Image: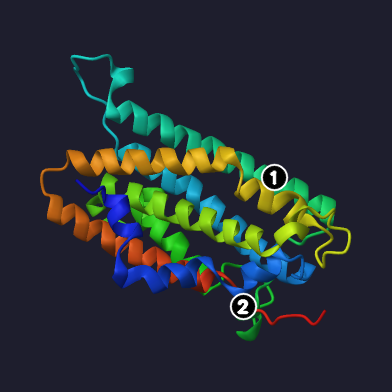
Amino acid sequence: MVSITHHLLHNAETAQLYRNATQSNYLRLAGQGKLPKDDLSKWLSQDRLYAQAYTRFIGGLISRLHLPMSSQRGTVDTLEWRVLAMLQGALEGIMTELQFFEKTAREYDLDLQACSACSSSQGATDFRPDDVTKRYIDLFDSFGGEAKKNAGAQHKSLIQGLVLLWATEKVYLDAWTYAKEQGGADAIANGDDDLDGGALRRHFIPNWTSDEFKRFVKEIQECVDACAAAYSAEDEVEKIAMEVWRDVLVLEESFWPSVKSRKE
């Protein structure tokens, strides 16, 4: 039987969306050390807001998880416990990530409150989420991060949230893996000549393509597949998962800013 994540990753209808979400010009320039510091600052500022909303999202998923009251096996051997442990790891990971953002930003003089071009074009001078980031924040908060503001949050299922978690992390990993590949043999350069001073290729890209992150994404994937297999309504789960997958791919494509290639 084909797993739900395999079905999503190999779906012909979303293949182009997947390429668009993981192979942008922004990522190509990032991997080649040709992304200016101000462009990195603007994107990183939005990614930080995304990460902050992610913490609430994980809380919403944990609130949907019910450990079994009784089990022939020990509680720690159940699927529910495995999912809980994975979500605990996700929360710990994003807290570490936020600290990593601030530490690296200080080291390379990156502005974590840089206004995006979208906000500036609307005459805004205060730092805030741009349109795409706001859509991500609203999506995360629809799982209960802002329960009082989201009356519909109660209708979102755990499996929807787990697919969303996996989709965002899988696309993020593959996108930065693509960026890393664009550097070729030069990817291990010291970064002194990079337009961002080396922040991406010394720190960010190695972090976002690390073996530890790959293992984390794989664990989410296995949890999603196991939870989906436990559902009796297979067609319903497949439909729900495809809707989430498609939404994430569309959002991710827009999350990468439009940048022009710099001349050598």
Residue situated in front as seen by the camera: 33 or 52 = 33
Q: Residue at x 26, y 47 (%)?
A: 3
Question: In the rendering, at what x and y percent does residue 235 appear?
Answer: 13, 55
Q: Which residue is mark 1?
A: 100
Q: Residue at x 46, y 47 (%)?
A: 56
Task: Name the residue tied to disc 2.
Answer: 119
Q: Quadrant of residue 232?
A: top left
Using the image, determine if residue 165 lies above or below residue 126: above
> In the image, what residue type sits under mark 1?
Phe
State the SS at label 2: helix
What residue type is disc 2 on? Ser
x and y, in percent, of residue 210 in the image? 61, 43
Q: Residue at x 34, y 69 (%)?
A: 14
Q: Nearer the viewer, mark 2 or mark 1?
A: 1
Q: Are marks 2 and 1 in contact (CB under 8 Å)?
A: no
| 224 w.r.t. 238: above or below | above
Left or right, 111 with reference to 221: right
Which quadrant of the figure contains the N terminus? top left
Q: How many marks?
A: 2
- How many residues crowd around disc 1 within 10 Å: few (fewer than 14), some, or many (20 or more)? some
